[in-house]
Image (cartoon, helix red, strand yellow):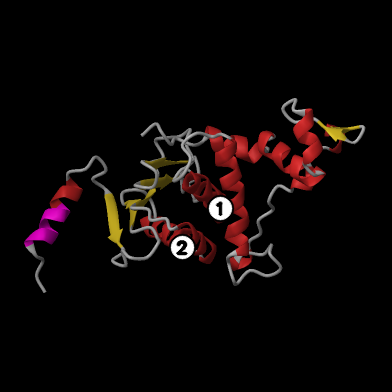
Amino acid sequence: MGSSQEEIQVVKEADSKPYKNVKRVEDLSSHDYTFHSIEVIENFPEPEKARKLLERLRDDKGIRAIMKKHKWNVGILQELSPSERTLLGFNRNNGQLISLRLRTNDMEGFRHYPEIRRVLLHELSHNVWNEHDDNFHRLNRQLNKEVVELDWTASGGHKTSNNEFYNPPEEEEIDEKAWQGGTFVLGGNSDRSKTLSKRELLAEAALIRLTKEEEELNKGCGSGKF
């Protein structure tokens, strides 16, 4: 069956874009909450593995459940060019395009799937919040829990599909030394601290105290730069 003029025009427009060696795989189920297109860099080694990684992210049961719950559609899920060596990923225009680093720095292999998925969850949080503030980190932590909780194949709330594990930062792990004499001071508002439970105050403190991994993800995020 021959190509229509519209299809030919789409191919011409794709070829005129900066990444001429990027191949797009269209997902025609545009009414689903999903990633509607996948792009990999064809002239790098093993492009099929790169594509399978992105397809695995798209089809991940936890990710799919998150997309449906939050009613998110992302136009393009893309392999990030390794030339952007300081970046792990970025989100352009609140979900128009999400680009993820798939390959190791030496270009000899691919990064581990759980690491790439955590970056994806970080970038999905930019669908709502642009800045890396408390609102952003609150949503990002929520998504990291939901990716496990909403995956019906997970066992015990901790085991994800494909035998991978996610260890979310626990609110109870906040340094107990922050409590002095039974009073926890958050932002200097002692009156407010009296009205909140210990768990609620620790939860707020957790938003202020970022984990090392969260700080690294912030540094490796290029959202707002592209």
**Residue at the image point whose x is 38% and y is 56% from the top:** 73
Mark number, residue 112: 1
| Position in image of residue 13 (x %, y %) | 16, 48
Binning the other alpha carbons within 10 Å of mark 2 as few (below 14), some (14 to 19) or many (20 upward) gives some
Q: Is residue 50 left or right of residue 148?
A: left
**Distance CA(mark 1)–CA(mark 2):** 25 Å
Q: Quadrant of residue 6?
A: bottom left
Name the foreground residue: 12 vs 30: 30
Dot label at residue 68: 2
At x 66%, y 38%, the residue is: 207
* Disc 1 residue type (three-letter): His
Asked which secondary structure carries label 1, the reply is loop
Does 118 sit left or right of 184 as displayed?
A: left
Q: Secondary structure at mark 2?
A: helix
The residue at the far right in this view is 181
The one of 121 and 102 positioned closer to us in this rendering: 121
Main SS, magenta residues = helix
The residue drawn where x is 56% and y is 53% is: 112
